[in-house]
Amino acid sequence: MHKIIMFFLLSSYLIFPFSVSSLSVSARNAVVMDIDSGRILYSKAKDEPHLIASITKIMTCVLAIESGKTEDIVTIGEEVLTMYGSNIYLELHEKMKLKDLLYGLMLRSGNDAAIVIATYIGSTEAKFVEQMNQKAKEIGMDNTIFTNSHGLDEKTKNYSTAHDMAKLSAYASKLPLYREISKTKKYTVASETKTYIWHNRNDLLYSYKYATGGKTGYTPKAGKTLVTTSNKNGLALTAVTLNDGNQYKTQIELYEDIYNKYDNYIILNKNKFKIDEAFYKDKIIIKNSFSYPLTSSEKDQIKILIQLTKLEKYKDNTIVGMAKVYLRDTLLKEEPIYVLKKEKVGIKYIITSIYTWFTTVFNCN
């Protein structure tokens, strides 16, 4: 029978209330969420469905990036003739790289770019919309339904929630090309017929120094919708406001309120992970670090539970335990613990050991 060894690494276990924002938020629905952990740090009617307008285009952009076709040259088809409202004024039979279309989609909210992208990726917009809804399910957007690729809501309507759109924003923000596009303030591209110069409509990029990207939206029925991201001192956040006439003011105040209350703490550091035990003569490691936003009082409520199983026989990279992180009684993270057999790791183990020693001695994160 295997014996389970349990270690409590942080002894302070006091009870404090969660911090509550005193802000008066004009948005009908709002969320501020930590991108890395998914923790909701502020919410107002976060799961109430609402028309979302052009923030729909975040999903269109995600699917285009994940298609692997961003370097393809796209020929503008007749689908472009059906678009109205916010356009980048693509012309029939014009040719443009898909990646360039994504800049027009995100910076200028081109409805014509959206329909062209959807038709190219999905062969028809209807099939592309099926992909949008499938991706929404994969991400956990349980209260979202897409019926078009652009967000116009006179004929078909897209519904989502502040919480779901925050999930989408967090997912998208982990795609390098999405981050690059959404933070770009000005983009110039030339087709064979003309030159385009696009300036980003997301005013937060110009008015808030910690802003890192996002997407705007508006229709008369939806009102103003806004999804943004920001990063201050390593705490990466996304904010969503729906139907808010003061959306930029609201989001700056929300961001500042959260940054004044929370810091990003590295709770499990894969480069400094160490267990004081004598059973395993080989190296015990975790493969991923874990950070989490906490208030100054909450950091004293974190508890790390190490469960280690004694195995007489094991192979290299065998899971021999679990590191569990708790905030009070709430499980935040489970991270597997591995054993690395020194004699089988060779030069890779030596390099890893030197790097771990170096970062530990010089206190590098």
Image: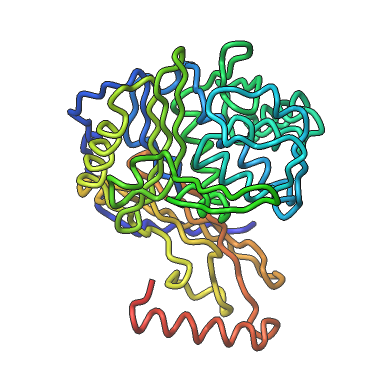
In the figure, is residue 216 to the left or right of 63? left
Question: Looking at the image, is 54 positioned above or below residue 300?
Answer: above
Q: Position of residue 294 (x, y in %)?
A: 29, 47
Query: Would you say residue 275 is visible in this rendering?
Result: no
Q: Nearer the viewer, residue 126 or 46?
A: 126
Question: Looking at the image, is 90 positioned above or below residue 278?
Answer: above
In the figure, is residue 260 to the left or right of 270? left
Q: Position of residue 145 (x, y in %)?
A: 61, 20
Q: Position of residue 289 (x, y in %)?
A: 47, 61
In the figure, is residue 12 to the left or right of 221? left
Q: Quadrant of residue 127?
A: top right
Question: Looking at the image, is 228 positioned above or below residue 148?
Answer: below
Residue extending furthest toward the right: 123
If the image is split into quadrants, where does the N terminus sit?
Answer: bottom right
Q: Quadrant of residue 176?
A: bottom right
Q: Nearer the viewer, residue 325 or 207?
A: 207
What residue is rendered at 35% in x and 48% in y?
211
Q: Quadrant of residue 40?
A: top left
What residue is rendered at 31% in x and 51% in y?
210
Residue extending furthest toward the front: 193
Q: Nearer the viewer, residue 139 or 24?
A: 24
Query: Would you say residue 215 is visible in this rendering?
Result: yes
Q: Position of residue 138 (x, y in %)?
A: 65, 35
What residue is rendered at 63% in x and 44% in y?
101
What residue is rendered at 70% in x and 25% in y?
81
Q: How many marks?
A: 0
If the image is split into quadrants, where does the C terminus sit?
Answer: bottom left
User: Which color scheme does this rendered protein use?
Assistant: rainbow
Question: Looking at the image, is 196 positioned above or below residue 148?
Answer: below
